[in-house]
Image (cartoon, grey):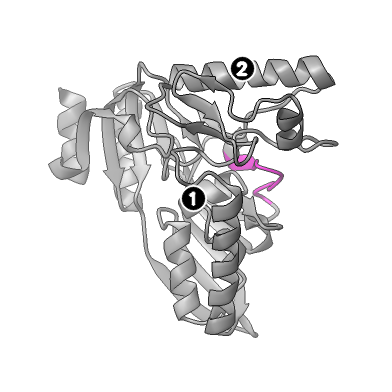
Amino acid sequence: MQVKERIEKIVGKENVLYNENMSKHTTFKTGGPAEIFVKVDDIEKLKKVLETAKEEKEDIHILGNGSNLLVKDNGVKGIVIRIDIEGIKTEEKENKIIVKLGAGEKLAAIGQRFMQNNISGFEELSGIPGTLGGAVRMNAGAHGKEIKDVIKKAKAVDYEGKEYEFTKEDMKLEYRSSIFVKEKYIIYEVELELQKGNKEEIKNKMEEYAKWRKEHQPLEYPNAGSTFKRGEDFITAKLIDECGLKGYKVGGAQISTKHAGFVINENKATTKEILELIEYTKEQVNKKFNKKIELEIEVW
């Protein structure tokens, strides 16, 4: 009770939920309850929540948009902190547009804002269904562009609440990885470097990418994007397809018939069913091609 009261004082009662079903907060639409679910929209509040969690010896889980995540059916112990820190500041510098954004800003909304303001360089990334903080953490990418191509700096705190500023080099941005995956830092602000563009051209590019996604990805079903990482010398989706697994089901979970790299929640799947399907897929690919495929999504 003391933990709950302390956190409510920091963020307000309306921003704290108890035994909150994580299926409401993941794009897979599965997952059991979080003991304490906290929405944080300010860096000082975040630091105070972290301090409380440490003093009360509570586990901490950091959430963006839940678009790269599977939460197990029995839920999450401790505190889930959803980063809702928003805000956009723009300045022009030597033919470049420097934009500072809160890590809780969603990529789709950022893309629309940039288009309206004739800011180019983000079009490929604007269809990724996540927050900016989550995208930086995973060095998210689409259509040949990754976050590392547009990022300049990031601000973060560790789980003690100490603040840090990272340059692009400090972040160690690699394929679906960064220092934020390997070490315990929480991103709260991101600085991007973009350029002036033409609104119509930006809009056309975004529409073209959206059309491609609709044709090639199973957007009509709950999923977490590409389920598996690509291999160093192979395309994972191609191997899954060649195993004849497109359309294969475990309960309500299915390998998409549209794109073999996507596991979808086809019909009220549980996380257990999704994980069983993932394991079966990994086994079949290893058996047929002697290749080990890795998950791109995280599992809590």
Question: Counting other residues with Cα less than 10 Å from the Cα at mark 1, is it few (<14), some (14-19), or many (20 or more)?
Answer: many
Q: Which residue is mark 1?
A: 133
**Element type at marker 1?**
helix
SS at badge 2: helix
Residue 29 lies in the magenta-colored region: no
Q: Amino acid at mark 1?
A: Gly
Left/right placement of residue 189 relative to residue 96 reads left
Query: Image point 82% across, 36% down: which residue?
Result: 234
Residue behind mark 2: 279
Q: Residue 206 placed where, x, y %?
A: 55, 68
* Residue 47 in the image: above or below residue 290: below
Image point 78% across, 35% down: which residue? Answer: 231
Residues in magenta, as a range:
170-180
Identify which amino acid the numbered label 2 is placed on.
Glu
- The numbered mark, 2 or 1, whose residue comes first in the sequence reads 1
Which corner quadrant of the image does residue 35 belong to? Answer: top left
Looking at the image, which residue is at 54% across and 61% down?
A: 210
Q: Position of residue 57 (x, y in %)?
A: 34, 21
